[in-house]
């Protein structure tokens, strides 16, 4: 049974750039994702850079070696199940293009990432996801699924409400704070005084727009802060990014469309077919 989103929640997402939906997944569903995450670092799924683990390493010790798993839904039936989860799809198909006058409520899943964030590990500096996943219609939506209670102490998400409205891409620079953030650079030049700390309970999902400025701090607790983050766009926007290794010329970028997608309902471009994903995924270690 899918989640029924209200008009007020849709309006809140359009105005603020984010929406927290409580208890969207059950604890049983969360545990299924947690158990699946361990399989990546133990090389039970094909990976491009398998981790070398100490003999008799516990699951927690194994998870401590990895910052993130990129595109787990490419090889994991569990991750693929949750990128197209009915309740997630219900929300995404109500908000992704809600700012557009004639949107037809089509959407597609395009990316997934598993974040482990064990105790003591860094967060991510201010950034906008649209910088990495460009869209034509500002429809990029991140769905941040809490696999543990995400709190201020363990490095939950922090957002700047309304920072998505102009569709402006802020410049970036080296943050100079390796003790707090990972190696990625940071967006800058804006007033961050209205930052909102968004604590998220296990099984709840934080949806946010691709232009929304957001960050997370170091995990200063003694607990993991695991999360599965899926990204979606309107079904009508092409996907001009390259995850498959081929080159894209400047003349074709306007019509290039990566078809390694998971449609949520009707796909306007279904006649183009779909591209099979790679047969292995990438593990991002903490060393960068």
Image (cartoon, rainbow, N blue to C red):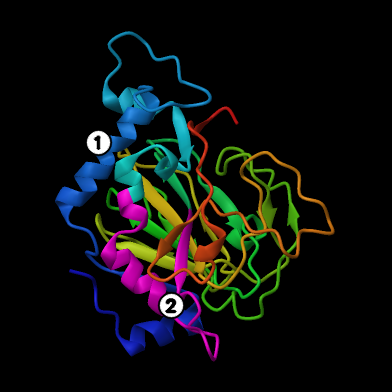
Across and down, in percent, residue 88 comes to: 32, 65
- Name the quarter where the C terminus is drawn: top right
Q: Which residue is drawn at the image coordinates 51% and 84% (left, top)?
A: 103
Specify few, some or many for label 1: CA neighbours under 10 Å numbering under 14, 14-19, or 20 or more.
few
- Name the quarter where the N terminus is drawn: bottom left
List the residue tagged with mark 1. Answer: 35
User: In the shown orientation, is residue 120 left or right of residue 248?
Assistant: left
Quadrant in which residue 106 is drawn? bottom left
**Residue 49 visible within the image:** yes
User: In the shown orientation, is residue 144 left or right of residue 85?
Assistant: right
Across and down, in percent, residue 207 comes to: 41, 67
Name the outermost residue toward the top. Answer: 55
Q: Which residue is drawn at the image coordinates 76% and 44% (left, top)?
A: 247
User: In the shown orientation, is residue 62 left or right of residue 194?
Assistant: left
Q: Earlier in the sequence, mark 1 or mark 2?
A: 1
Across and down, in percent, residue 219 comes to: 42, 43
Label placed on residue 146: none
Quadrant in which residue 85 is drawn? bottom left
Name the outermost residue toward the left. Answer: 28
**Residue 196 visible within the image:** no
In the image, the segment drawn in magenta is: 81-110
Q: Is residue 206 above or below residue 162?
A: above
**Foreground: 201 or 231?**
231
Q: Is residue 224 above or below residue 191?
A: above
- The mark tally for this picture is 2
Q: Which residue is drawn at the image coordinates 53% and 25% (left, top)?
A: 48
Across and down, in percent, residue 132 comes to: 64, 55
User: Is residue 89 on the magenta stretch?
Assistant: yes
Q: Is residue 104 above or below residue 132?
A: below
List the residue tagged with mark 2. Answer: 95
Circles 1 and 2, Cβ within 8 Å, touching? The answer is no
**In the structure shown, which secondary structural element does the residue marked by tag 1 occupy?**
helix
């Amino acid at each position: 049974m899918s989640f029924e989103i209200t008009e007020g929640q849709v309006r809140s997402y359009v105005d603020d750039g984010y929406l927290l939906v409580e208890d969207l997944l059950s604890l049983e569903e969360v545990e299924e994702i947690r158990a699946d995450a361990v399989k990546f670092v133990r090389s039970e799924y094909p990976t491009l850079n398998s981790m070398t683990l100490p003999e008799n390493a516990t699951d927690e010790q194994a998870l401590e070696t990895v910052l993130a798993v990129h595109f787990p839904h490419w090889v994991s039936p569990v991750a693929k199940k949750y990128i197209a989860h009915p309740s997630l799809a219900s929300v995404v198909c109500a908000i992704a293009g809600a700012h557009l006058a004639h949107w037809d409520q089509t959407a597609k899943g395009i990316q997934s990432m598993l974040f482990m964030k064990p105790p003591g590990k860094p967060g991510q500096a201010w950034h906008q996801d649209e910088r990495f996943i460009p869209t034509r219609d500002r429809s990029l939506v991140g769905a941040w699924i809490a696999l543990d209670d995400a709190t201020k102490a363990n490095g939950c998400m922090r957002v700047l409400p309304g920072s998505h409205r102009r569709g402006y891409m802020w410049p970036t620079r080296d943050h100079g704070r390796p003790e707090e953030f990972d190696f990625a650079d940071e967006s800058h030049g804006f007033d961050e005084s209205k930052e909102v700390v968004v604590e998220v309970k296990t099984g709840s999902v934080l949806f946010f727009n691709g232009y929304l400025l957001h960050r997370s701090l170091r995990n200063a607790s003694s607990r993991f802060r695991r999360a599965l983050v899926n990204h979606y766009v309107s079904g009508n926007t092409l996907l001009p990014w390259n995850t498959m290794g081929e080159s894209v010329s400047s003349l074709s970028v306007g019509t290039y469309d990566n078809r390694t997608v998971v449609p949520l309902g009707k796909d306007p471009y279904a006649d183009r077919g779909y591209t099979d994903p790679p047969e292995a995924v990438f593990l991002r270690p903490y060393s960068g």
